[in-house]
Amino acid sequence: MTGYVLRRAGGALIVLFLLSVLVHLLFYVAPGDPATLACGPRCNAEQIRQVREQLNLGEPLPTQYLHFLQGIVAGRDYSTGTGVLHCPAPCFGLSYRNDQPVTELLAARLPVTASLAFGAMVLWLLLGVGTGLLSALRRGGITERVLTVLTLAGTATPVFITGLLLLMIFCAALQWLPFPSYVPLSEDPEQWAWNLLLPWTTLALLESAKYARLTRSSTLETLAEDHIRTFRAYGVRERSVIGRHALRGALPPVIALNAVDLGTMFGGAMLTETLFGLPGLGQLLVQSVRTVDLPVVVAAVLGIGAAVVLANAVADVLYALADRRVALR
């Protein structure tokens, strides 16, 4: 198991390195001159030249990439004309819009997106795995048919329709819930959860349908294996057969899918954040693309990619714990 974990960690580091190279190249293939974008439309040629020197844009690409890595690891210093601004590590540069370190912008938005992603993940796992398991155990009955219809409806309904319906019903008509607004967890945990309940439910209803179908098919496949029939033949209690053996064998594909969904949720919840007015990373990325704020775009893309890689690395370890045969590969 130790060797397996080390191999997966090494693979994750290689992927992160390649991702940083691609993201850094994105900085140069994007439309517009970075120096002109950073300086602004009112700058003259001399001011643009000074900005180009400050950003080291005249150096070869490998050298610029080393400066990029140096900023991430040790931080960088930027000249502001009247002094020097130190950008602490991990430094992804300064925003073109307000000359603020990109790391500060991301740090302000990250708690919102993390709260949304992890809360929704808990709900979609509970709903999806529970529904899929129940559907597999009630195969051929009315319960399975009803759950199949509900999961198909959940998959086919766009997130903005589900979110609008929930807002109209629970906030406007019944007034059971407040209109969502982000409250930091450290300030008021109850209001934090209460205000995020609708966004969590909106995402969970969409995502749980996939997990229900996957859990159902995996459970049915596991229940048909020889060792399950052997346990039943020896008189092992059905609850133990399902909970300790069948469900454990059905979890690995669920773990793999959850890793991808959780990682992409850090940048893929733009519709949900916009619909509910949550100032998360998705909204920041959309705004930065519209204004061609390249340092923020580069940092956001790299951060989202790192979240996907990290989530998949953790999922590989959990996958091996659920199925010990994986650790031998």
Image (spheres, grey):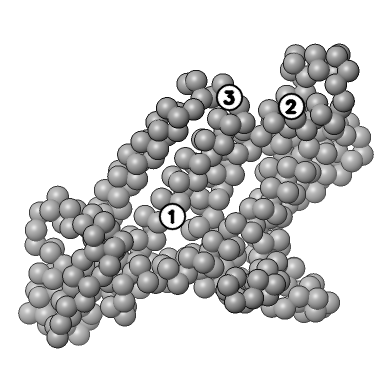
Q: Which mark is residue 304?
A: 1
The residue located at (28%, 67%) in the rendering is 88
How packed is label 2: few (under 14 Cα within 10 Å), some, or many (20 or more)?
A: some
Query: Pointer 3: what residue?
Result: 324
- Closer-to-camera residue (12/272): 12
Identity of the residue furthest to the front in this view? 2
Note whether 97 is above or below 19 in the view shown: below
The residue located at (86%, 13%) in the rendering is 233
Q: Is residue 30 visible?
A: no
Query: Pointer 2: what residue?
Result: 245
Q: Is residue 281 left or right of residue 61?
A: right
**Distance between the alpha carbons at the discs numbered 3 and 1:** 30 Å
**Distance between the alpha carbons at the discs numbered 2 and 3:** 13 Å
The residue located at (71%, 36%) in the rendering is 215
Q: Quadrant of the rendered structure where residue 11 is?
A: top left
User: Residue 228, percent across and down?
Assistant: 78, 19
Q: What amino acid is labelled 2 in the image?
A: His
Q: What amino acid is labelled 1 in the image?
A: Ile
Q: Find numbered disc 1 in the image and state the secondary structure of the residue it sits on.
A: helix
User: Residue 49, percent across and down?
Assistant: 9, 74
Q: Is residue 25 visible?
A: yes
- Do callouts 3 and 1 mark residues in contact (Cβ within 8 Å)? no
Q: Find numbered disc 3 in the image and state the secondary structure of the residue it sits on.
A: helix
User: Residue 139, percent across and down?
Assistant: 86, 31
Earlier residue among tags 2 and 1:
2
Earlier residue among tags 3 and 1:
1
Q: Quadrant of the rendered structure where residue 231 is?
A: top right
- Closer-to-camera residue (202/246): 246
